[in-house]
Image: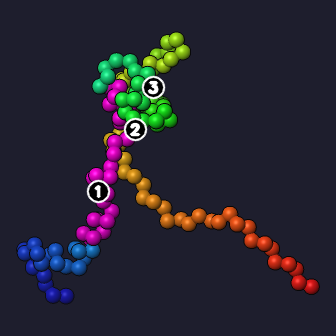
Amino acid sequence: MPHQDFTDENSFRATLGAQLRKARTMTRSKPRADRRPTWTSLILEALVRGDDFATVPQLCAATKAKLGQCTAALHHLRAHHAADCLASDGQLFWYATPGTDDRTKIVPERAPEPAGNRTRRSRVVKAAKPLQE
């Protein structure tokens, strides 16, 4: 194998292995524009920014989340002590408690999942072949 001088950076980048590594890393990374904040981080931010009690409809209006997304995020935050609620007159009032947050991993952004490549099976049932005697 001939000796390669790696002092010139262009000669190293021209090697086949370096080009393949660069191509692999470019295909794995997602563009930054496709990432959006998670609903949990948006709900927690709205609770902290509000600095007061908030109901679920108020949080849905502030974050533009659907009811299911909002309640799922609040359930997660309450399970990890990042938010808590008080009940009054049959309504829940939520407030942030970021000082007692015990989550070990906080993901501020989510990347959309790629579209699957599975084909759907047709629902047409084929007729059975008649028995031959």
Q: Is residue 27 above or below residue 50?
A: below
Is 36 magenta? The answer is yes
Image x and y of residue 117, in percent: 49, 65
Q: Of discs 2 and 3, which sits in the foreground?
A: 3
Image x and y of residue 54, in percent: 40, 21
Q: Which residue is mark 2?
A: 39
Query: Secondary structure of the magenta portion, mostly?
Result: helix
Q: Quadrant of residue 11?
A: bottom left
- In depth, the one of 126 and 40 nearer the eye is 126
Q: Is residue 3 above or below residue 119?
A: below
Q: Which mark is residue 56?
A: 3
How much space separates mark 1 and mark 2, taking CA atoms?
20 Å
Identify residue type, mark 3: Val
Q: CB of mark 2 within 8 Å of CB of mark 3?
A: no
The residue at the point 54 percent across, 15 percent down is 90
The residue at the point 16 percent across, 74 percent down is 13
Label 2 residue SS: helix
Other residues around mark 1 within 10 Å, as few (<14) / some (14–19) / many (≥20): few
* Residues drawn in magenta: 21-48
Label 1 residue SS: loop
Residue ranking furthest to the left:
7
Sequence-wise, the earlier of marks 1 and 2 is 1
Is 51 magenta? The answer is no
Identify residue type, mark 2: Trp
Q: Is residue 98 above or below residue 87?
A: below
Other residues around mark 3 within 10 Å, as few (<14) / some (14–19) / many (≥20): some
Q: Which residue is mark 1?
A: 31
Q: Is residue 117 visible?
A: yes
Q: Quadrant of the C terminus?
A: bottom right
The residue at the point 45 percent across, 60 percent down is 115
